[in-house]
Amino acid sequence: MSSLANKQILVGITGGIAAYKSAELVRRLQDRGATVRVAMTRAAQEFITPLTLQALSGHPVHTELLDPEAEAGMGHIELARWGDLIIVAPASADFIARLAQGQGDDLLSTICLARRSQLALAPAMNQAMYANQATQDNLALLAQRNIAVWGPASGAQACGDVGPGRMLEVDELVNLAERQFNSGALAGKHVVITAGPTREAIDPVRYISNHSSGKMGYALAAACAEAGAHTTLISGPTQLDCPPKCERVAVQSAEQMHRAALASLDNCDVFIASAAVADYRPATVEDQKIKKKADTDTMLLELVKNPDIIAAVAASPKRPFCVGFAAETQDVERYARGKLERKNLDLVIANDVSQAGIGFNSDENQVTLVDAQGSKTLEQLSKNQLARILVVDIAQRLN
Ligand code: C5P
């Protein structure tokens, strides 16, 4: 399966004759499983119509920054956050210059300014414009800012000149896009991830559980597999599909998760505990459904402590690099550091679950990374985007 499967890619089109190839780019990205949305500058619309791109992408094309109707649909900031990757193809000399200056004078430049994902440019222009020192300086500046510059190729140009400035062919752009999600940063490593809630049985029909959706752990598993890791996902009950190239071990209770975790430690390089494990379970599980009693309005349920899974992994002689999560409602960093030390972890990913819209059951998260050296807070991102950043961070720590 392509690493572009289920990815959200925003294709930006600026004014240049190579814009006719952008239609094909949209199609080929979709062939590999990506969902594509398109934003066009005014100049791009002189070369290819929004209608063509709308028909191909299956979504309205975004062209205006100050259009109340368009903003009511998907606003420019929302659009900037939507993409797992933004590809501007073709990127004209003018657009590159505006980007280097940090201008936000149209929709596409604003999206690029507000983005949270990787941005890639496929420059396309006349060879003399490309060779001009101003363009070269602008591209060098953008590369320093971690913006990927794909191409250009060299050869015959529409204007009759010959030289560097041709947009890369669509197949090459699609391959480069695939490589974005296939970094190889964890190639040869075995990562084990716990995810989701646990269910602690009371009787054959009832259990104690929590609202964990498993989304963060599943996003991490997908990102680890994308980065080349052999990935084992030990999952409590969730509604989610197993991410591609991951091996899922389905469990119900904390005790089952504990056993599966300890059994996975041979050749395990990284253990990531994102599961919301129930701290306690009923002391006994009744064989038969507990009947409602007519003579009393209360019922006592005795609970016993569950094993701390990540602490057990960190105490094992086969100890891998251990990453824990800390969901807190106050004093996030202090409590996270307490967990780091008490459970003997290498890294704690902490978030404030009292904030609406992040953490439990939501699609976005904002986290602080806490280790023995200090802490750093990342911006609020979709769980998928965040997972990719965390994987790069963890890979760097491993190496
Ligand atoms: O102690 P607390 O539950 O707040 O710690 C959270 C971290 O510990 C998470 O990484 C969670 O997956 C892990 N944990 C565990 N086993 C438990 C409880 C928590 O692995 N029984």
Image (spheres, rainbow, N blue to C red):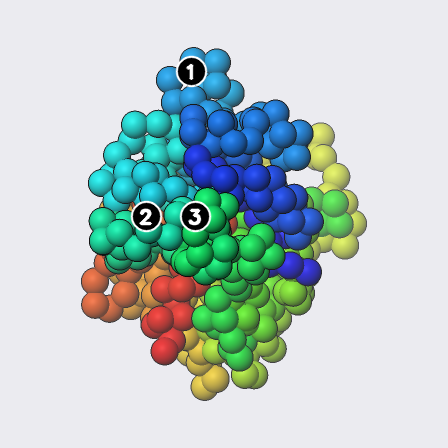
Q: Are marks 3 and 2 in contact (CB under 8 Å)?
A: no
Q: Amino acid at mark 3?
A: Ala
Q: CA distance from mark 1 to mark 3?
A: 28 Å
Q: Amino acid at mark 2?
A: Met
Q: Residues within 10 Å of mark 3 (few under 14, many from 20)?
A: many
**Residue closer to the observer: 59 or 220:** 59
**Cβ–Cβ below 8 Å for labels 1 and 3?**
no
Numbered circle sitting on residue 129: 2
Q: Residue furthest right?
A: 288
Can you tell which quarter of the image residue 21 is in? top right
Is there any visible trace of residue 363 in the rendered image? Answer: no
Residue ID at (74%, 45%): 205
Estimate the x, y position of residue 188 in percent, counting from the top left. Answer: 53, 79
Residue that badge 1 annotates: 67
Specify the farthest residue to the top: 68
Work out whether 81 lies above or below 197.
above
The amino acid type of the residue labelled 1 equals: Asp
- Residue matched to label 3: 124
The residue carrying pointer 1 sits among few (fewer than 14), some (14 to 19) or many (20 or more) residues within 10 Å by Cα, namely: few
